[in-house]
Image: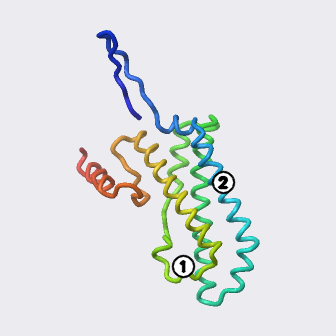
Amino acid sequence: MSEFRSVQNGLVADRVTVSFGERFEASGQFDAVFREGMGLVEEVAAYLDGLGRRESKALKPPLSVLYATESMRLTTRLLDLASWLLIRRALKEGEIDADEAKRKRQRVKLKALGRPGHIKRFEELPASLQDLIERSFALHDRIVKLDQAVRSENSPGIDCLDEPSVGNPVAAQMNLLRQAFGN
């Protein structure tokens, strides 16, 4: 949230609070992120049930185990992202209030496990799965940044503690120090 003070003709106007979360949710940008996220969920489900199933059967162990592990991580990541999107949409549509959205959000863990750069033999997985995983991480990173902006506006000076910092790791550490020492 940002507060602005306006001075015109020597008069000071009251403060106006601008909420990033409310502005974002009311914008077409939220709708675009929502459609992208839900579209990716549908695309992954169709892939895993169709082409992905056929591709996985052609893999030999241990690559088949890696495929199963990464497809499970992908599904879990997308379920968390979809949950976040659905909570924000419900808040936007007035189906839930801010307190309920906050309680529901606390159950959503936006963890970024299994980054492709850290997975041995990732490049040997089917190209379709690799692409879906990469796209899910791109969406994940965008949603984490949006979530951090919305959460920091509701609790100034407090960064998301359940996710690794995607943006500025120094700022995240500074926030943790402020929290620890009460400044």
Residue 99: give x, y in percent of width and height: 52, 39
Residue at the (49%, 68%) spot, across then down = 113
- In the image: residue 76, left or right of residue 148: right
Give, as a three-letter code, the residue at label 1: Phe
Give, as a three-letter code, the residue at label 2: Met
In this view, 121 is above or below 131: below
Label drawn at residue 38:
2
Lower sequence index among marks 2 and 1: 2
Instruction: Give the crowd class for mark 2: few <14, some 14-19, many >=20 residues within 10 Å.
Output: some
Residue at the (69%, 81%) spot, across then down = 56
In this view, 136 is above or below 71: above
Dot 1 corresponds to which residue? 122
In this view, 120 is above or below 50: below
- In the image: residue 77, left or right of residue 180: right
Q: Which quadrant of the structure image shows residue 52?
A: bottom right
Quadrant including the N terminus: top left
Instruction: Give the crowd class for mark 1: few <14, some 14-19, many >=20 residues within 10 Å.
Output: some
The CA span between labels 2 and 1 is 25 Å
Q: Find numbered disc 2 in the image and state the secondary structure of the residue it sits on.
A: helix
